[in-house]
Image: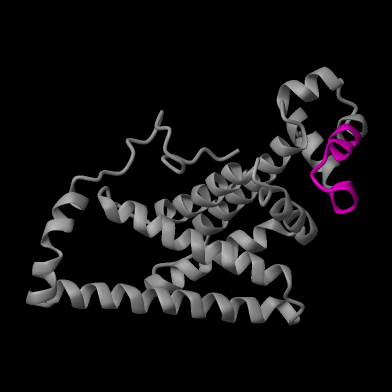
Amino acid sequence: MPDTADKILDAALMHVPFDGWSETSFRAAVSDAGVDPVVGRGLFPRGAVDLAVAYHKCGDAEMLRRIEEADLDEMRFRDRVAFAVRARIEAAEDREAVRRGTTLFALPIYAPDGARLIWGTADAIWTALGDTSRDFNWYTKRATLSGVYSSTVLYWLGDDSLGSEATWAFLDRRIEDVMRFEKAKAQVRGNRFLSGLMAGPAKILDRVQAPSGEGSDVPGGHTVPR
């Protein structure tokens, strides 16, 4: 049986396409769910903004479920990443709710929330795929995937191709770009002259460590499925 927060979120999705993630949608959702407004505000102190955050985290949880159920052993690693990003986008289901959320988190006041959510999604993907990096690569992997994910979502929002095939082709191209960049990095490390030039910066970056996890205030330091 859905808990109170789930009931409010489900009810909100009926209003978001018309009123966005707004106070109007929040109040209507609380009323439709038959929840006391005081209880609703206690669950979602910022109203619709917190509802939008909860909706995004629900998508992350569904993505993780799909990854866990899939057989990824025979896939190339780049294909595993593509599968995960596609699973996250398909988990959203309601394109208009995503579109309205994108508009909300583009506002300067809520942009930090949006950045944390995207970073959290990238972190969830890397963690689910078995990433064990604890150095500077922990950050670069998540930053790169955040860019791939967010650009693919924006493409998907405007994609009217059958089965969103244009979006998945776009995703493959973005991942291919990342692969080229990683190959270039490897070539630099293998070049005696260039690796010598980078020795100083590399020593500094080696001191950078990933967040400790639970209790860390770094976005994406840990992912808690809803």
Which contiguous range is marked in magenta?
Answer: 14-28
Residue 147 spot, x, y in % from top left: 50, 63
Residue 165 shows up from this direction: yes
User: Is residue 117 within the magenta segment?
Assistant: no
- Left or right of 124? Residue 55 is right
Question: For the point 51% across and 66% down, which residue is it?
Answer: 148
Residue 184 spot, x, y in % from top left: 27, 77
Locate the C terminus by quadrant: top right
Question: For the point 61% across and 46% down, which residue is it?
Answer: 111
Residue 67 spot, x, y in % from top left: 51, 58
The residue closer to the viewer here, 78 or 203, is: 203
Residue 74 shows up from this direction: no
Question: For the point 24% across and 45% down, which residue is it?
Answer: 208
Q: Is residue 58 above or below residue 43?
A: below
- Left or right of 220? Residue 14 is right
- Left or right of 131? Residue 33 is right
- Left or right of 144? Residue 200 is left
**Which of the 4 image quadrants contains residue 89?**
bottom right
Q: Is residue 70 above or below residue 182?
A: above
The residue closer to the viewer here, 74 or 148, is: 148
Residue 53 spot, x, y in % from top left: 66, 41
Question: For the point 72% across and 30% down, which residue is it?
Answer: 46
Q: Is residue 24 above or below residue 117?
A: above
The main secondary structure of the magenta stretch is helix
Locate the N terminus by quadrant: top right
Q: How many marks?
A: 0
- Residue at the farthest top position: 38
